Image (tube, grey):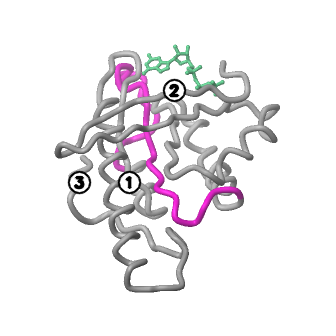
Amino acid sequence: ATIGVDFMIKTVEIKGEKVKLQIWDTAGQERFRSITQSYYRSANALILTYDITCEDSFRCLPEWLREIEQYANTTVVTILVGNKIDLAEKREVLRQRAEEFADSQSMLYLETSAKESDNVEKLFLDLACKLIREAKRNTLDNNDTAHSMPGEGKAISYLGCCNTN
Ligand SMILES: Nc1nc2c(ncn2[C@@H]2O[C@H](COP(=O)(O)OP(=O)(O)OP(=O)(O)O)[C@@H](O)[C@H]2O)c(=O)[nH]1
């Protein structure tokens, strides 16, 4: 189990542009909550991961979304990830149900297997692609609006260049 917060760097390349992602893996356990909450504010993106073989982990998502709403930046990009697809025979949460939930909360959705590295690269590519697009859009918007701060009050849209599924 993660103790507090773990850090790692991953670099991906999108259309010739290198994107360096600094990934903060925050502990899920309640006893670390006061530490992990302080990391939300400066995050550009959040990967919210549940276990497709565990209904309880899916039911906890609204609680995590409340945390995000309370502590994260309003412009944060959020991806919901259903992990452990290598254990398909033990699946408890149907993909469609998770997709509908993600959609209702304006989150991207992806299913992965960390064990078999299935869709993990795609997850980081989709995320980087989305972040580049948001950053470019904010730059353009800010050129138009002299007094706005970078990233301030910008709605997140999931339509556009990145095919996420
Ligand atoms: N079969 C399978 N097991 C996995 C997969 N990903 C993680 N696990 C296992 O699930 C368990 C929990 O994984 P963790 O990475 O510790 O989960 P976590 O939610 O990050 O836990 P915290 O760090 O405490 O927040 C471990 O036994 C992992 O080996 C996966 O894709 N497939």
Q: Nearer the viewer, mark 1 or mark 3?
A: 1
Horizontal relation, residue 28 to residue 30: left or right = left
Find the magenta span and give its range.
Answer: 71-96
Does the Cβ of the disc 1 residue fall within 8 Å of ligand 1?
no
Q: Estimate the x, y position of residue 30 in percent, counting from the top left.
A: 78, 35
73 to 93, vertically: above or below:
below
Distance CA(mark 1)–CA(mark 2):
18 Å
The quarter of the image holding the N terminus is top right
Number of numbered discs on residues? 3
Q: Secondary structure at mark 3?
A: loop
Q: Secondary structure at mark 2?
A: strand
- Circle 1 Cα neighbour tier, 10 Å, few/some/many (<14 / 14–19 / ≥20): some
Say what amino acid the circle numbered 3 marks: Cys
User: Looking at the image, in which quadrant does ligand 1 appear?
Assistant: top right
70 inside magenta stretch = no
Q: Residue at x 36, y 31 (%)?
A: 112
Q: Estimate the x, y position of residue 158 in percent, counting from the top left.
A: 33, 63
Distance CA(mark 1)–CA(mark 3):
11 Å
Q: Estimate the x, y position of residue 31 in percent, counting from the top left.
A: 82, 31
Lower position in the chain sequence, tag 1 or tag 3: 1
- Circle 3 Cα neighbour tier, 10 Å, few/some/many (<14 / 14–19 / ≥20): some
Lower position in the chain sequence, tag 2 or tag 3: 2
Residue marked by disc 3: 162
Say what amino acid the circle numbered 2 marks: Met
- Circle 2 Cα neighbour tier, 10 Å, few/some/many (<14 / 14–19 / ≥20): few
Nearest the viewer among 128 and 139 is 139
Residue marked by disc 2: 8
Lower position in the chain sequence, tag 1 or tag 2: 2
Q: Which mark is residue 131?
A: 1
